[in-house]
Image: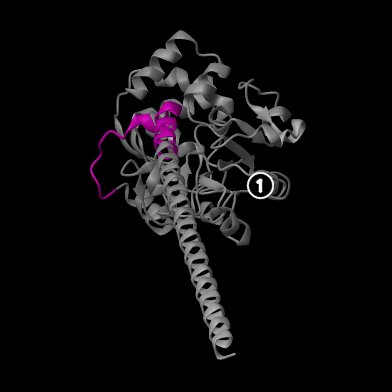
Amino acid sequence: MYFNNLIENIKKNNNNLNLLKYIINPFSPYILCNHYLGNEITNINLFYSPNVNNLLINKNYNIIKQYDIIFTEVNFIDYFINNILSNINKKIILITGQWNYPQVFIGNKTEFLLNHPLILLWISQNPIYLNHPKYIAFPYGVAPYNLKKYADQLLEKIDKKKHIAFLPINNDTNPCRKRLPILPNIDACEYYKNISEYEFIVSPIGDRDDCYRHYECIGLETIPISNVGDNYKVIFEDNMYYCNIDKIVEILDTNIVDISYSIPNREIICFDYHKDIIMKKIEELKNKDLQNNTENKTENVSFRFKNFLNTTQNTTQNITQNITQNITQNINNNISFQFKKYIK
């Protein structure tokens, strides 16, 4: 469904601005969020979500509503913690990511964010946590500067004639890439056409585990062979061949991979596919949070009512006891007076 809709949108309008809205890419969080904190999108003059609030410029933190989505570039996480999270009293959904390096790594700040009571859900490119109820991975996506050429190739008929390929990479972005062949660069159109002809393509990690090639392969019905970490299996599921760099070198030497080819799930490159996953998760957590709030309010009302009853009961007992004591004392005093009078 999602991929077919994507193809229809490409046929209607394949300019780069439109493609950024439909093909998953590093700037996709800007479409998802209500507010953003960063400057990458303005630095490249790419502003395709006019209704999204720029917190860095506007500093209007007071308009943040309950369950709003805030996208924070990695370089501005400290700013987010110190200037926004500390100045709001609403629960929010946080997205972190960035087109350029660096990525987020586990540390005191990430633990603080993960356990903060005002962060209902943390969505992150280049995921660092696995199987946490408040954390969900988000894809990095296709190269944003080649979307037009990539979309053109998506419209072409795919004919898998070849088995395994290794295409040019930047061999300097990760030590593991030093063990792989150095090939001359090729034009993006030729690059995408080559991908579409192979069943498997070697797609090693680069400066980060996630990279364009993973998604570019899957969209063109090719299975990427990669040494990504386990955190990425929630994104790629069984649409990637997972192995270490030693196995990748062996595969290139032998031209043999120990799984059968099957067409990967092309919907992984669709923005709406991931958006629906995210929105379903947010709705689930919102309902749970609202239910907890209702239960807490009910418990508080019940507790206050019990306190009221206890207070009322104690007050009544005290009044009764005081009246009884006063009557008894008066009777005793009267008897004593009468007795003394009688003696006299």
Q: Is residue 132 magenta?
A: no
Q: Is residue 268 magenta?
A: yes
Q: Horizontal and vertical percent for residue 166?
A: 43, 41
Q: Is residue 39 visible?
A: no
Q: Residue at x 43, y 26 (%)?
A: 272
Quarter of the image where the N terminus is located = top left
In the displayed structure image, the side of residue 20 where residue 246 appears, left or right: left
Q: Nearer the viewer, residue 269 or 90?
A: 90
Q: Residue furthest left?
A: 260
Q: On screen, 18 above or below 86?
A: above
Q: Residues within 10 Å of mark 1 (few under 14, many from 20)?
A: some
Q: Horizontal and vertical percent for residue 63?
A: 67, 32
Q: Residue at x 43, y 54 (%)?
A: 132
Q: Which residues are magenta?
A: 257-282
Q: Is residue 323 visible?
A: yes
In the displayed structure image, the side of residue 57 where residue 303 appears, left or right: left
Q: Amino acid at mark 1?
A: Leu
Q: Residue at x 43, y 53 (%)?
A: 302
Quarter of the image where the C terminus is located = bottom right
Q: Nearer the viewer, residue 266 or 137?
A: 137
Secondary element under disc 1, as helix, strand or loop, is helix
Q: Nearer the viewer, residue 7 or 36?
A: 36
In the displayed structure image, the side of residue 147 where residue 222 appears, left or right: left
Q: Horizontal and vertical percent for residue 222?
A: 35, 34
Q: Residue at x 52, y 67 (%)?
A: 323
Dividing the picture into quarters, in which one does residue 165 lie? top left
Residue receiving disc 1? 85
Q: Horizontal and vertical percent for residue 137?
A: 46, 45
